Amino acid sequence: MTITGATGNGTALTGLTLTGNDISLGNIGGLAAGVSGASSVTAADGAGPDAGSITLTGTTYNQNQLSLNAGAATNAVQVAGGAAAALTTITTSADTVTVTGAVDLTARGLTADSTTAGGSAAGADIGFNQPIDGAGALTLTGGTLGDVTITGRRATARR
C-alpha cells in the first residue's frame, strides 16, 4: 500500500486506519491539520525479508494518538522522508506514540513530540519496543507526564 502526498492536509481527518503488507506513508497534515483522532498503521507479516514494513516517506506527521505496528521485517519501520539527513517529525496533541518493530533511521533524523511542539507541557507516553538503528539523530519529547520507553535489543550471533 502506497499513500503519497499529504493526507488530511487541508481538513483534518477524524481518524486513520491503514492495514496492509508493506505500507509506504507520505505526510499526514501540514503545519496544523492531519488527523484529529487516533491513527493506526499496521503492516502484516508476509513473504520476503522486508514484508510487514512501514516506510515513512514524508517529513510531517501531525495527529493525535499514533500507533505504528510493523511485522517482523528486518527494517520494520523505516524513516526515509526527504533528502538524506532530512528530519521527520511526529507531533501529537498530548497523545501517545507507540512504535512496534525495529526502526531504521536510514541516516535521517526522527523527532517524536507528544507535547504539541511545547503547546501542552504534560505531553504523553512515547514507546518503542525494538531497537532503533541508523545514523540519524533521534529526539523524543514526552513532556512532564509522558514516559519515554525504548525496549528490545538486537540479537547477536555467537560462534
Image (tube, rainbow, N blue to C red):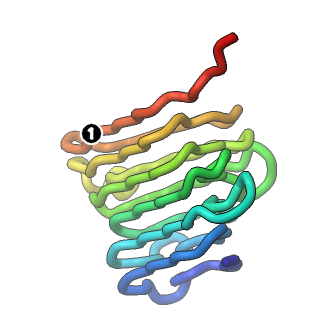
Q: Position of residue 85 (x, y in %)?
A: 74, 43
Q: Is residue 80 above or below residue 131?
A: below
Q: Residue furthest front?
A: 159
Give the quadrant of the C terminus. Answer: top right
Give the quadrant of the N terminus. Answer: bottom right
Residue 129 in view in this figure: yes
Q: Position of residue 124 (x, y in %)?
A: 26, 51
Please report the residue visible at 74 percent of the width from the left and 58 percent of the height from the top.
48
Residue 59 in view in this figure: no
Q: Residue furthest bottom?
A: 11
Q: Is residue 77 above or below residue 38?
A: above
Please report the residue visible at 58 percent of the width from the left and 62 percent of the height from the top.
45
Q: In the image, what residue type sits under mark 1?
A: Asp
- Lateral position of residue 147 relative to residue 55, left or right: left
Q: Residue furthest top?
A: 159
As rendered, which of 100 and 61 lies closer to the eye? 100
Please report the residue visible at 27 percent of the width from the left and 58 percent of the height from the top.
94
Q: Is residue 127 above or below residue 15?
A: above
Q: Quadrant of residue 7?
A: bottom right
Q: Is residue 147 above or below residue 40?
A: above
Q: Position of residue 65 (x, y in %)?
A: 34, 65
As rendered, which of 75 and 139 lies closer to the eye? 75
The crowding category of the residue bearing disc 1, from other C-alpha atoms within 10 Å (few below 14, some 14 to 19, many at least 20), is some
Q: What residue is shown with label 1?
A: 147
- Lateral position of residue 137 relative to residue 70, left or right: right
As rendered, which of 147 and 45 lies closer to the eye? 45
Please report the residue visible at 52 percent of the width from the left and 83 percent of the height from the top.
8
SS of the residue under disc 1:
loop
